[in-house]
Amino acid sequence: MATRKQQSPPQQPPPQQGSPQPNAQPTPSPHQAVLDEVGPRLKRLRARRGLTLAALAETTGISKSTLSRLESGQRRPSLELLLPLAHAYGVPLDDLVGAPEVGDPRVRLSPRPHANGGTFVPLTRSPGPLQAYKLVIPDRGAEPDLRSHEGYEWLYVLDGRLRLVLGQHDLVLGPGEVAEWDTKVPHWFSSADGRPVEVLSLFGRQGERMHVRAKPKGDGGPVN
């Protein structure tokens, strides 16, 4: 009896070197991985600062929808969007894109001339109702020029002697002394002895006050 010869299956040609393999997933570039992390990083940063999308949109001029899409990864981050966000948060652009730490913890402060004389240094690096400043106040003369405006101010004298005229009160404060007032009350301050005085200022433009948490009774620890 004649037997049928079984045919072997046709051989597949070996894949050429460099040709794509079936079902192979493309490897994302390192740059794409960095960009994918920008949105979640922006969302975490906004949450830590306690800002709403509406408040951030008002500060940066970027629409709420664009900010939302940027945070969710639906909008590709660009320099045009990241620059105003870095400015609003008061952080370097590197912090938004996740650049590696360089190991330098120093904060770069920028002293600025004050319109009424002296120097002020912004200490707050983020937008918010309360802003902190260090002021170096010169002798502004003996005749007070009282002014008033919206807000609430808290001053702590670091060094020197500060003359504070507040409404009908004429006060002199030394190192370690504090004053706070509603800035709608006419006020003026100057060095009290002709030498520059250094103060720490907390100012709320809409009348926000600094809240001091009192220590529990009988607790010898510091006040927070």
Image (spheres, rainbow, N blue to C red):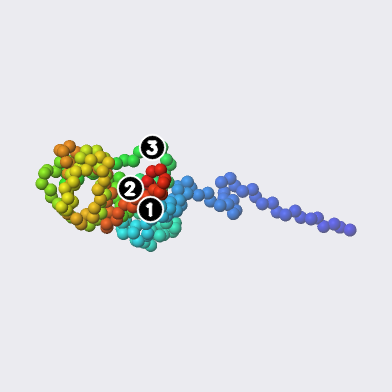
Residue denoted by label 1: 49
The image quarter containing residue 53 is bottom left
Number of residues whose C-alpha sits closer than 10 Å to that of mark 3, classed few (under 14), some (14–19) or many (20 or more): few
Residue at the image point whose x is 29% and y is 41% from the top: 109
Residue closest to the far front:
218
State how far apart marks 3 and 1 are (Cα): 23 Å
- Give the residue number, with chain letter if any, for mark 2: 125
Tell me, yes or no, if residue 103 can be seen here.
yes
- Classify mark 3: helix, strand or loop: loop
Can residue 88 be spotted in the picture?
A: no
Give the Cα separation between the discs numbered 2 and 1: 11 Å
Type of amino acid at the residue the image marks with label 1:
Arg
Q: Is residue 30 left or right of residue 159?
A: right
Q: Which mark is residue 210?
A: none
Residue 16, given in percent of the width and then of the height, sits at 59, 47
Pinpoint residue 52: horizontal percent, then vertical percent.
37, 59
Q: Secondary structure at mark 2?
A: loop
> Comparing marks 3 and 1, which lies closer to the viewer?
1
Q: Residue furthest right?
A: 1
Furthest residue in direction bottom, as rendered: 65
Question: Is residue 191 placed above or below 48 in the rendered structure?
Answer: above
Nearer the camera: disc 3 or disc 2 = 2
Report the residue marked by disc 3. Answer: 104
